[in-house]
Every structure is written in structure tokens, then in C-alpha cells.
Image (cartoon, rainbow, N blue to C red):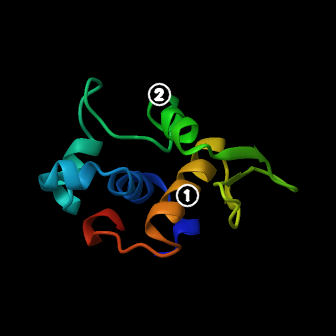
């Protein structure tokens, strides 16, 4: 799937993978296991594309630049400057940019997360 088209659980899984979560916790790498983590309770869940407490530190650590897009939404870039990534929200744009900087412009998403 193109990184620029990732949304919802597929984007959050890609961020989790790019940040090393799947390597640190191999059982979470599969789609079904990540789905349980993603749907977790309020104390334990993974939603970096919608939760600033999870996505914000990634933006800061990776020194991503986020700003308004020309027509609507937001754009994000990583340093050294690369192609910008668009999103409806700053977090979506930034997380797509982060995933692209770590995993590339196409990512193989587990089938369970693309339905």
C-alpha cells in the first residue's frame, strides 16, 4: 500500500512498525495481534495518527516539519528535506512522513488491517 494512502489502523500499524514496536514486541507484528493492541483499553492502546501524546513525541524526536498545505489539510517533511506527505490533520501528515522516512513509500500491511 502506498504510504501516502495509509489511514486509521493501517497507518498506526505502520508507525508502530517504523518506530520499532514490532521488533521490540514481535507478537504485535501480526495483524490480528496488533488489532487487539489497537482496540485496547484506555490505558493501553496504539493510535499515533490521532493521539498527540503518541504522535507528538515522534514529530519532535524525528524533527518533522508540519504546516498547512496549499489548498487544504497539512503537509509534513522530514530532514533532510524529502517529498512532502499530505494529510487531513497534522498527525496524519506527520505519521505518513515518518513511515516513509523509515519504511519507504510503499508498505506491506497485514491483510487483517486493510479490510
Q: Residue at x 68, y 65 (%)?
A: 82
Image position of 67 (left or right of 4): right
The label number, if any, that marks residue 81 in the structure image: none
The label number, if any, that marks residue 96 in the structure image: 1
| Residue 96 pos. (x, y %) | 55, 57
Q: Secondary structure at mark 2?
A: helix
Image quadrant in which the C terminus is located: bottom left
| Residue 34 pos. (x, y %) | 23, 52
Q: Residue at x 28, y 69 (%)?
A: 110
Q: How many marks?
A: 2
Above or below, 71 relative to 82:
above
Closer to the camera in the image, 72 or 24: 24
Residue position for label 2: 53
| Residue 35 pos. (x, y %) | 24, 51
Sort mark 2 into few (<14), some (14-19) or many (20+) by Cα contacts within 10 Å. Answer: few
Q: Residue at x 40, y 40 (%)?
A: 47
Give the CA distance from mark 2 to mark 1.
17 Å
Snapshot quadrant of residue 23? bottom left
Q: Residue furthest left?
A: 27
Amino acid at each position: 500500500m502506498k504510504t501516502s494512502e495509509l489511514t486509521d489502523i493501517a497507518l498506526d500499524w505502520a508507525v508502530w512498525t517504523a518506530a520499532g514496536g514490532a521488533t521490540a514486541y514481535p507478537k504485535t507484528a501480526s495483524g490480528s495481534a496488533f488489532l487487539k493492541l489497537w482496540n485496547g483499553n484506555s490505558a493501553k492502546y496504539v493510535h499515533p495518527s490521532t493521539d498527540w501524546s503518541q504522535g507528538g513525541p515522534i514529530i519532535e524526536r524525528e524533527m518533522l516539519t508540519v504546516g498547512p498545505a496549499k489548498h487544504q489539510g497539512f503537509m509534513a517533511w522530514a530532514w533532510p528535506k524529502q517529498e512532502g506527505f499530505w494529510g487531513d490533520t497534522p498527525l496524519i501528515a506527520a505519521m505518513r512522513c515518518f513511515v516513509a522516512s523509515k519504511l519507504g513509500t510503499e508498505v506491506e500491511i497485514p491483510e487483517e488491517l486493510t479490510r
